[in-house]
């Protein structure tokens, strides 16, 4: 009789002890892996979101850049981490969609090895050229490239990025021939573009727009379906190439088997952070739109984009160098 009475009491005591521990998350710094180099769009955007999210969660968020391997190096570091919510990463169109069709083999499975927590943003790319290129519009670029096949070299921040595949799609839709030169970082590519080592890029607006505004490069077009309010004088590429549209996206991911409670908490805090005046203003300056989502919506986006970009890779004949 005594034992029967004691067991429920002990169970309640265990629950009471365990509950505060579960509710304590987070109680130490959170590491946020950015699988690309400092200075690029992913790095700038996560450093814009990080302080607001840290303020809400009450713990520091430490940005840890792990570039290389078409986002594979940083993503694999996340895959191997403990699913306790203290190691997260930036996951985007490259790591969550295009890698599957571009790489000979991908050492992780998005649905089995990762937890998609929340999408955060959407980005357009800007087509920019070196001042030595004698063109000022997209039609002039197409005409020049056709007269000079293989003469123009375009840079990107890596194989499989929208800076790479966006131009491959442009080539396929216009019939022009240009040489791809991949870099490990967007900043290195832009430096070569300004210096004349390459002639053209179609890179995320956080990287390209400041250069164009400063007069270091010439902006020809934007990759969104329509002109953006932030850059009203830059025409959409689709105005000259009907149907052309390229958008990048990215959000926060974790390793597989994360607690549902932690995922729910993080998703809620990320969505709140994205609506904060500080983040909205910083994203606007960087040329990004907020695109909050539920975990389920983020996974659906990854699935849809994987199919879409597989078709574009096949159409363009793009390959990993």
Image (spheres, grey):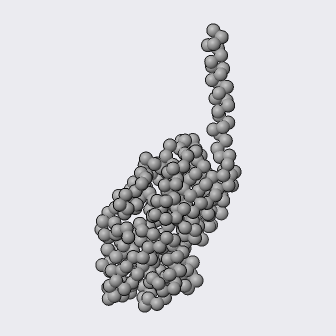
Q: In the image, 105: left or right of 183?
A: left
Residue 150 vertical placement versus 116 (above, below): below
> Can residue 162 be seen from the camera position used here?
no
Residue 239, position in %: x, y? 39, 77
Q: Residue furthest top?
A: 1
Q: In which quadrant of the rendered image does the C terminus lie? A: bottom left
Which residue corresponds to the image point at 47% horizontal and 73% vertical from the top-left?
183
Q: Residue 3, located in which quarter of the rendered image?
A: top right
Which residue corresponds to the image point at 53% horizontal and 44% vertical from the top-left?
258
Q: In the image, 62: left or right of 77?
A: right
Q: In the image, 204: left or right of 309?
A: right
Residue 251 vertical placement versus 281 (above, below): above
Which residue corresponds to the image point at 51% horizontal and 50% vertical from the top-left?
80
Q: In which quadrant of the rendered image does the N terminus lie? A: top right
The front one of 240 and 305 is: 305
> Can residue 58 be seen from the camera position used here?
yes
The front one of 127 and 17 is: 17
Q: Residue 140, located in which quarter of the rendered image?
A: bottom left
Q: Residue 303, located in which quarter of the rendered image?
A: bottom left
Q: How many marks?
A: 0
Residue 317, position in %: x, y? 31, 69
Which residue corresponds to the image point at 62% horizontal and 67% vertical from the top-left?
282
Residue 136, position in %: x, y? 44, 87
Residue 311, position in %: x, y? 32, 63
Q: In the image, 168: left or right of 277?
A: left
């Amino acid at each position: 009789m005594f034992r029967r009475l004691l067991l429920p009491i002990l169970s309640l005591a265990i629950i009471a002890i365990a509950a505060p521990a579960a509710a304590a998350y987070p109680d130490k710094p959170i590491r946020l892996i950015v699988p690309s180099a400092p200075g690029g769009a992913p790095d700038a955007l996560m450093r814009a979101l990080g302080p607001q999210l840290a303020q809400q969660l009450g713990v520091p968020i430490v940005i840890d850049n792990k570039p290389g391997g078409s986002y594979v190096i940083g993503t694999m570091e996340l895959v191997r981490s403990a699913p306790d919510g203290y190691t997260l990463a930036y996951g985007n169109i490259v790591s969550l969609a295009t890698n599957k069709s571009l790489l000979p083999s991908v050492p992780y499975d998005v649905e089995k090895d990762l937890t998609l927590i929340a999408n955060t943003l959407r980005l357009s790319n800007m087509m920019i050229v070196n001042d030595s290129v004698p063109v000022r519009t997209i039609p002039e670029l197409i005409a020049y490239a056709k007269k000079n096949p293989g003469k123009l070299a375009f840079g990107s921040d890596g194989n499989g990025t929208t800076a790479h595949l966006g131009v491959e799609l442009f080539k396929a839709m216009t019939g022009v021939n240009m040489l791809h030169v991949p870099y490990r970082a967007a900043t290195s590519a832009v430096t070569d573009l300004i210096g004349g080592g390459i002639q053209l890029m179609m890179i995320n607006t956080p990287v390209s727009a400041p250069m164009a505004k400063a007069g270091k490069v010439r902006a020809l077009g934007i990759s969104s379906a329509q002109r953006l309010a932030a850059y009203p004088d830059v025409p959409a590429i689709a105005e000259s190439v009907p149907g052309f549209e390229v958008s990048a996206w990215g959000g926060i991911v974790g390793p597989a088997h994360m607690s549902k409670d932690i995922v729910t908490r993080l998703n809620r805090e990320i969505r709140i952070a994205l609506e904060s005046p500080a983040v909205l203003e910083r994203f606007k300056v960087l040329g990004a739109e907020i695109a909050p989502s539920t975990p389920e919506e983020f996974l659906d986006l990854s699935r849809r984009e994987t199919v879409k970009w597989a078709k574009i890779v096949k159409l363009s004949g793009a390959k990993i160098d």
